Amino acid sequence: MTFDAIIIGGGAAGLSCALVLGSAKDKVFAKDKNMDLLSLLIGTVVLRPYVFIFLALYLLIASQQMGWKRTLLWTITGYAVAFAAEYSSIHGGFPFGDYYYIEATRNQELWIAGIPFMDSLSFSFLTFTGYTCAWHLVAALKRRNSQPDDSVYQALRRSPWVLVLGALITTLMDIIIDPVALMGDRWFLGQIHGWPRGGDYFGVPWTNFAGWYLVTAVTIGVNQAIDSLLNRNNEQAGRPGIPYMHLGGFALFIFIVGFNLFMTAWLREWHLFFTGLPLALAILLFFWHVLSGADFFAPHPAVPERNPEPA
């Protein structure tokens, strides 16, 4: 295979050169140039920097909460479940409804089987956000009624209530995210997807949100099963070493939802903004009520020390 340029070296200068070349793929002078997988990956980062900022935060938080092995497995399974669901939707209308992608950026970023790589990848950190928020909400509710030890706290990751609540939180996030994503032609996301017959909720059909709940529930369920298997093999999950990292999922929720609300306001879509803002505030108020009632804002989620028994 013949290429028009080759970069030798992977240091700061090489990466800078790669980013410059990758960002030029849609220019007139680059139309007939041969782009390889690396160039498309670089183009994906250049086009969607905010996605990879969220991804980096997710990797930090998840590795602290679950360890790197579980984080890697979550990323892979989250991508695989999302890709399967998106592929099924664009070919059969399930589970997101009659859905299509606009391949305007095919030569600028990585696409796999008609689906943008970054789109399926984003499900990994979105589903994890709902999951870890649900895990710590269930743990906080448990603490209100008792003082569970660390093994109980860790075991709650695999609770069916975490699956149900985690899928709901992620779906509520998408209610804020998808309508503004549908307006991507008016901001730097670009117009990448849509529904031929539109939808009742700012152009998005309600079947899409039902699909999000299903996909998130499957992703959480698969990873809970993997977690149980690893636990039986005595492969312990990570313990947050960085203070307040157990609250990282709530911070990620705020960053993701806040970014999308900011873009909605920037587009001056005030009806959508004042529909999404009360929903976001109501969710945050619920988070605060549950966590503060269980004294969950300590630097670490450790169980308070019990008073020693008298000698």
Image (cartoon, grey):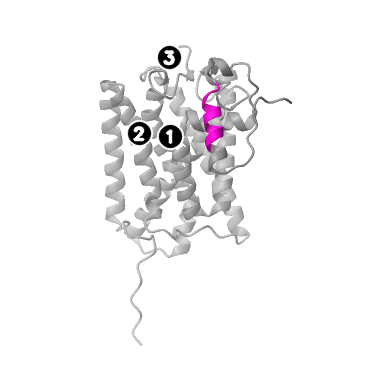
The nearer-to-camera label among 2 and 3 is: 2
Q: Which residues are magenta?
A: 16-25
Percent across and percent down for residue 171 are 42, 33
Q: Is residue 226 left or right of residue 277?
A: right
Nearest the viewer among 54 and 140 is: 54
Image quadrant where one finds the C terminus: bottom left
Q: Which residue is mark 2?
A: 259
Residue 159 within the magenta-colored segment of the rendering: no
Residue 108 shows in the view: yes
- Sequence-wise first label, 1 or 2: 1
Percent across and percent down for residue 12 are 53, 42
Nearest the viewer among 214 and 103 is: 103
Q: Are marks 1 and 3 in contact (CB under 8 Å)?
A: no
User: Dominant secondary structure of the magenta stretch?
Assistant: helix
Q: Is residue 124 left or right of residue 87?
A: left
Percent across and percent down for residue 221 are 54, 43
Secondary structure of the residue carrying tag 1 is helix
Q: Quadrant of residue 191?
A: top left
Q: Spatial distance from mark 1 to mark 2, Cα to Cα?
A: 9 Å
